Image (cartoon, rainbow, N blue to C red):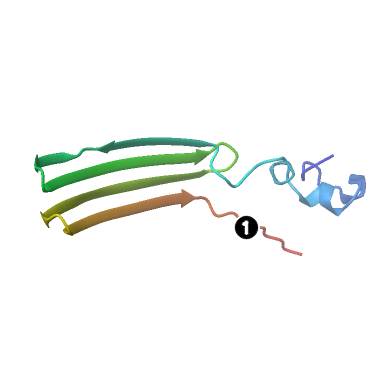
Amino acid sequence: MHGASSLDIGNSSNYADFFVPLNRIQEGTNQPTHTYKTELSLNWSPSATTSISPLISYTYQDNDDTPWESQKFNLGVNAWWAPTNKLNFVLAYNFYHEKTTTDYWFTYFNG
């Protein structure tokens, strides 16, 4: 008998059978079980010496074994300029946001 379905400790075979719920002994993982990613990037070159490259990406991850999910958002732009054949300038900006949610469970023992 697993779990605390009976309050008669004498019927349990050991301490773990009485106090450990079933979901604590099942197999599982703390890694994402699903990952969905969408990404878009463009490259625009108005001349032979300049280019602008914006990018955007979104990633969603979840786990079937635990109440965990993660959302990641990335937004950026790169600008390139080459005034001469031997000199290049690159200016870049990236914004990254990540949100992770999970339930926090802790063991409570009173006795």
Residue nearest the viewer, comparing 26 with 14: 26
Quarter of the rendering occupied by the C terminus: bottom right
Q: Position of residue 102 (x, y in %)?
A: 50, 50
- Crowding around mark 1 (Cα neighbors within 10 Å: few <14, some 14 to 19, many 20+) is few
The residue at which mark 1 appears reads as: 106
Residue nearest the viewer, comparing 43 with 75: 43
Give the total number of marks visible in the rendering: 1
- Location of residue 29 (image quadrant): top right
Residue at the farthest bottom position: 111
Q: Residue 64, relative to residue 87: is it above or below?
A: above
What kind of residue is marked 1? Phe
Residue 89 in the figure: left or right of residue 69: left
Residue 90 in the figure: left or right of residue 22: left
Considering the numbered disc 1 on the image, is that residue within a helix, a strand or a loop?
A: loop
* Residue visible at 77% across and 41% down in the picture: 5
Residue nearest the viewer, comparing 48 with 28: 48
Q: Position of residue 49 (x, y in %)?
A: 11, 48
Residue 80 in the figure: left or right of residue 3: left
* Residue visible at 60% across and 39% down in the picture: 65
Q: Position of residue 109 (x, y in %)?
A: 71, 61
* Residue visible at 26% across and 55% down in the picture: 94
- Location of residue 1 (image quadrant): top right
Q: Position of residue 37 (x, y in %)?
A: 39, 36
